[in-house]
């Protein structure tokens, strides 16, 4: 069965490593994550973005992840990524997701707390884990200038207050990462991360982790990050595999001949991430 994220993150805290949270939106990516996790003997989180839900639907994503979990000998969790409303979180819980993120990061602090608590109240009763977000994690198109850092990045004191008022299972923070491909090399605010980690016991989540140098991710893990979200690097590998297959044979008409190498390329990238996060052999 699919396992709660909370359990995986508690074990990651004991072992001082991070669990990879990989975005899924089709069968091949689900299979790639399963294959990588099995090969590395690692716990993994599969997660569905808003775009994935629009593309495949909650039921398909859950169905695919459940089949993967039923075949696996390693722990697999299914998580809603950047949940937009109480209603969406409830839909995912009802279908069988084992974790939901309620992203109230655009709301004023007290409203973010109230919305998170509303989701937690139901999630607790069903054994589902809850992730919240504090601070704004941009896309790479919104460049954050140094003088804007305090407005966008997570405030350590606010993080302490947020956790005290919610008891949330995982907290996504903003320390300089962004979703999508980076233009340059992102500079993470490690001093801020260290402060936050010193003020809360809650596992910390790093979003926008594709394109962040491995050493920086490992430093973030050393300082307390326990869930690392990867989407873009899987897209690059998967689509790159498709492109390569079509370049090798422009007349190919069998989708399986295009998708199998894409799945293999995704598997390799996910294995590298799992190793970098220290979660190999932790299943
Ligand atoms: O939330 C982060 C995702 O990388 C955005 O994905 O375009 O599928 O919604 P999406
Ligand atoms: P990337 O696409 O930058 O890897 O970000 C993924 C993410 O944070 C999903 O929530
Ligand atoms: Zn994210
Ligand atoms: Na990124």
Image (cartoon, rainbow, N blue to C red):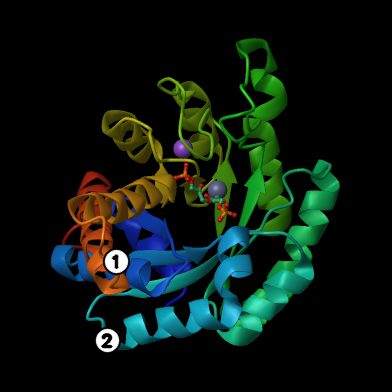
Q: Residues within 10 Å of mark 2 (few under 14, many from 20)?
A: few
Name the residue located 27 percent from the left edge and 48 percent from the top edge. Answer: 273
The kind of secondary structure element at disc 1 is helix
Image quadrant containing the N terminus = bottom left
**Vertical placement of 209 versus 2: above or below?**
above
- Asked if ligand 1 lies within 8 A of label 1, the reply is no
Q: Which mark is residue 71?
A: 2
Q: Which mark is residue 112?
A: none
Q: Nearer the viewer, residue 15 or 32?
A: 32
Distance CA(mark 2)–CA(mark 1): 21 Å
Q: How many marks?
A: 2
Name the residue located 23 percent from the left edge and 44 percent from the top edge. Answer: 276
Picture coordinates of residue 192, whole percent (x, y): 53, 26
- Asked if ligand 2 lies within 8 A of label 2, the reply is no
**Vertical placement of 110 versus 11: above or below?**
above
Name the residue located 61 percent from the left edge and 22 percent from the top edge. Answer: 143
Picture coordinates of residue 204, whole percent (x, y): 49, 47
Q: Nearer the viewer, residue 212 or 233?
A: 233
Image quadrant containing the C terminus = bottom left
- Residue 55, quarter of picture: bottom right
Q: Is residue 151 left or right of residue 71?
A: right
User: Residue beneath label 1, please?
Assistant: 259
The kind of secondary structure element at disc 2 is helix
**Vertical placement of 49 versus 230: above or below?**
below
Picture coordinates of residue 248, whole percent (x, y): 18, 52
Of circles 2 and 1, which is in front?
A: 1
Q: Is residue 186 left or right of residue 253?
A: right
Picture coordinates of residue 151, whole percent (x, y): 72, 24
Query: Would residue 194 be visible to someone looking at this image?
Result: yes
Q: Is residue 28 left or right of residue 116?
A: left
**Vertical placement of 97 versus 269: above or below?**
below
- Residue 30, quarter of picture: bottom left
């Amino acid at each position: 069965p699919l396992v709660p994220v909370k359990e995986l993150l508690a074990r990651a805290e004991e072992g001082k490593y991070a669990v990879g949270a990989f975005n899924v939106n089709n069968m091949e990516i689900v299979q790639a994550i399963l294959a990588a996790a099995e090969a590395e003997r690692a716990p993994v989180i599969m997660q569905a973005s808003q775009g994935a839900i629009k593309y495949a639907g909650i039921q398909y994503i859950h169905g695919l992840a459940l089949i993967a979990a039923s075949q696996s000998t390693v722990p697999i969790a299914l998580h809603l990524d950047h949940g937009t409303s109480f209603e969406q979180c409830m839909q995912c819980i009802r279908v069988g997701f084992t974790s939901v993120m309620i992203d109230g990061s655009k709301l004023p602090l007290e409203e973010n707390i109230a919305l998170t608590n509303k989701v937690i109240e139901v999630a607790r009763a069903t054994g589902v884990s809850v992730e919240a977000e504090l601070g704004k994690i941009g896309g790479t198109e919104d460049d954050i200038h140094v003088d804007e850092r305090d407005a966008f990045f997570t405030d350590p004191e606010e993080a302490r207050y947020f956790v005290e008022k919610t008891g949330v299972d995982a907290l996504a923070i903003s320390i300089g990462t962004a979703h999508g491909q980076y233009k340059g090399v992102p500079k993470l605010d490690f001093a801020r991360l260290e402060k936050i980690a010193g003020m809360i016991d809650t596992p910390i989540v790093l979003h926008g982790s594709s394109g962040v140098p491995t050493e920086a991710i490992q430093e973030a893990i050393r300082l307390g990050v326990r869930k690392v979200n990867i989407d873009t690097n899987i897209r690059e590998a998967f689509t790159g595999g498709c492109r390569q297959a079509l370049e090798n044979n422009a007349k190919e008409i069998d989708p399986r001949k295009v998708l199998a190498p894409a799945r293999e390329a995704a598997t390799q990238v996910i294995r590298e991430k799992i190793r970098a996060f220290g979660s190999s052999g932790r299943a």
